[in-house]
Image (cartoon, helix red, strand yellow):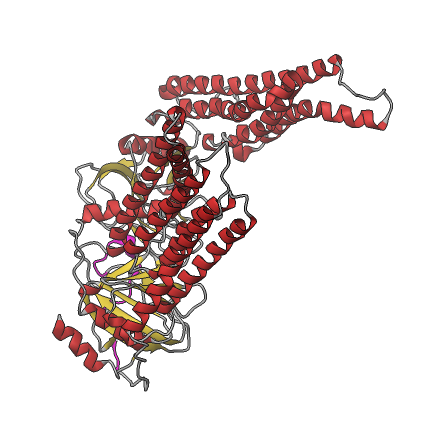
Amino acid sequence: MWLGVTSGRVPEASIAVVSARWRRAKFWLGTCVALHLALAAFAVGATVWRYRQGVEGLPDFGSKALGAGVYELAFPAVLAVLSLVVGVWLVRKPQLTRSPDSWIAIPLATGVLMAAGVGGAMVHVMSESAGNVNFVLIPGVIAFAMLPVYLAFRALLRPLVAELGDSTVPVILQVRAASKKWWYQDSIRVDTESVRLAVRSGDGRPTWGESTKETPLRDVAAVGARSATGDEPPWAWLSDGRGLSVPPGEALVVVTATDEQLVPVHDAEVLAELLRRRVRLVTGRMPSTLDTDGAASPNPGPATEPAEPADSGTEKAAGHVPEVLPAPPRTGQRVTATSSGTVPPAGPGMVFRGVLSTLLGGFGVIVAPVVGVLLTRSRAVVDPEAPWLSEWVAGFGALWLTIGFLLWVVSIRVPRRWPWIGLISSVPVALAAWFSEDGLVNDAGTVIVVVALVATVLARLVWTRRLGTDLAASASEVPVRLNGQGIGRLLIQRDRIVFDRRKTGAGGHVRHALALADLTLAQPGETAGAEVPTWPLPGGSMLRLRRGPALRLVAGSQQWIVPVLQPDLIAEIVRGRAARARPLGYRAPTVEEWHRLRRWSVSATTAARGRGLGTAQAIGNRLLLIAMFPAVFGTMLLTVVFGRGLTGIGTELFVIIVALLLAVALVVIWYRRRSALILAEDNQLPPGSPSWGDPRPDRAPIPAWRPWSAPTASSEARVLTAK
């Protein structure tokens, strides 16, 4: 079909519309070919011209060195001609030329080769000054090579018209997925054989494999379009068990003898008429038209119903929205608690932890940098040309020491951040010391960074090692490593428990959180059985448990089972904090707000890496690292200006303002994104959701659960009484 005369078998009624579109598409395809020929001619011409001009230092003809020089000289022309050869070879591939959505792959491949050839030709023409030109020219050649083919695709298929159904042109449209990344899409494709629906993400986290449903055109009995209400059964199931809710708006309905498929798309009425005409073109019969009164379909069918293991214990109903499925069973088997036979350790006490961590943290964040500032200031050599240098060293170090101290005060309840704060406080001081010409001061800068890091790490270990029940009375965050390679950790905070899961292959994994004020059950126990159990988390994630000790937590409608080595101790800490926890201070989102929040959080935690599907990424934490560079540069220049006495600050003042404003803007963006993510973490289930599994303490949420009774019974009663 590439540069062909017609695009397929077209009836007389539609030949004018399709032929006009095909002529416009051929014009743009021809433009792409002409552009490649012109660029190849330029590369060859530039090579010939350069050869005739002569190459300085080129040996006489016939020597081995001459051959190497000629090859190097001809390299741009070879690349340009190779681009044309590759293009002709790709055009002969039917899998690329038959479908307009695949056309763009051809100029992408040829454009890279052509851009390299044209860039080399510019070196022949402009010599040393070609570098700056090629910085813009090479990506420009690739873009302009692809642009005509994209315009040809648009000219043929956009806007969508029903007359395309009277041709053999494959038509592909994206479904109305509310959140998608550029490296994958959810689409419906109509060709000359079938209607193919491929779904990988919907409005949530992408899966490793596509869920597909292919309906042969000969089986299509009726086609129509109607308005979806948004409260209907799922229109598709993903390969990991999650369902996709129907977004409100227009939708295509395809009916066969055994199935009825709803597909939310734009221009649903046009696509329905196009599909009817395509069925008539292929089979010779026109399928019937469905009513468009907006009534819900009596039997909506999924795109793919993935088979589940018989022992998975999951279900796709129970009142949960499709995006959070699969869910655990609503009811569990009655179980009898057994004694663990252990007593949780008490710990060294809060006074010991508080005093020791404060001394170590203060030494790393404050004392070590102060020593560095004083040492650098006292041993600074006064430069007659820059007498202000010693003042700059003191001012720059003192400024970042103050910033580090304020950050430490703000994060006093989050010990895992202290090592980073120690680096923020000490590295700028060491940077100022490294500017000194005194060898002792240079070495001291490195020592200060090491001492600050070691001291803050030891301060953090005061809270993360030797866990005990004394931590129940603390408001500081306690990280608990889960029992499993690469599973993650629990972050027991003052008012929340966060399940900080390690990065997994696919992206879109938002952390889960429970509100301690809503805690109703903290039950230690163990998982046992012949097979390794799993626990589903809202959103299609499965937590693989180990046979061994575990902790069961129930708060609101949420329920977790997490593997920990000391579940009785962690349960005591959680209950003690739950008795003092305050309710989360924000309004719960509505169902519509929850859908928008989920779409944003999943999209924001999906990155363009990992087999094209994305991997989980820390939300915005890179922004803080990037903000450090303009912040350090801006404050360094600011202290230089003040040390110099505010003389000659015209251009420098502008640079200072831009750098500091950029740093502040990045920090503000991080704070806003982090605040929104916390809201998403606390609302993994939408409002009004039923319980996630059976929350009753005498029932097992999974068959492998075995609860422990002592020594938690009295503590449980104390927590419930306090509430």
Location of residue 90 with respect to 557 vertically, above or below: above
The answer to which image quadrant residue 491 occupies is: bottom left
Q: Position of residue 627 (x, y in %)?
A: 38, 41
**Closest to the observer, 363 or 526:** 363
**Closest to the observer, 621 or 616:** 621
| Side of 209 relative to 161 (left or right) | right
Identify the magenta region: 318-336
Q: Position of residue 654 (x, y in %)?
A: 37, 27
Question: Magenta-highlighted stretch: main secondary structure?
Answer: loop
Q: Residue at x 38, y 53 (%)?
A: 421
Q: Residue at x 61, y 27 (%)?
A: 116
Camera sees residue 392? yes
Camera sees residue 41? no
Location of residue 281 with respect to 355 vertically, above or below: above
Q: Position of residue 133 (x, y in %)?
A: 56, 21
Quadrant position of the C terminus in the picture: bottom left
Q: Position of residue 425 (x, y in %)?
A: 39, 51
**Closest to the observer, 375 or 245:** 375
The answer to which image quadrant residue 181 occupies is: top left
**Closest to the observer, 132 or 383:** 383
Residue 324 inside the magenta-drawn segment: yes
Q: Residue at x 28, y 31 (%)?
A: 267
Residue 96 inside the magenta-drawn segment: no
Q: How many discs mark residues in the rendered view?
A: 0
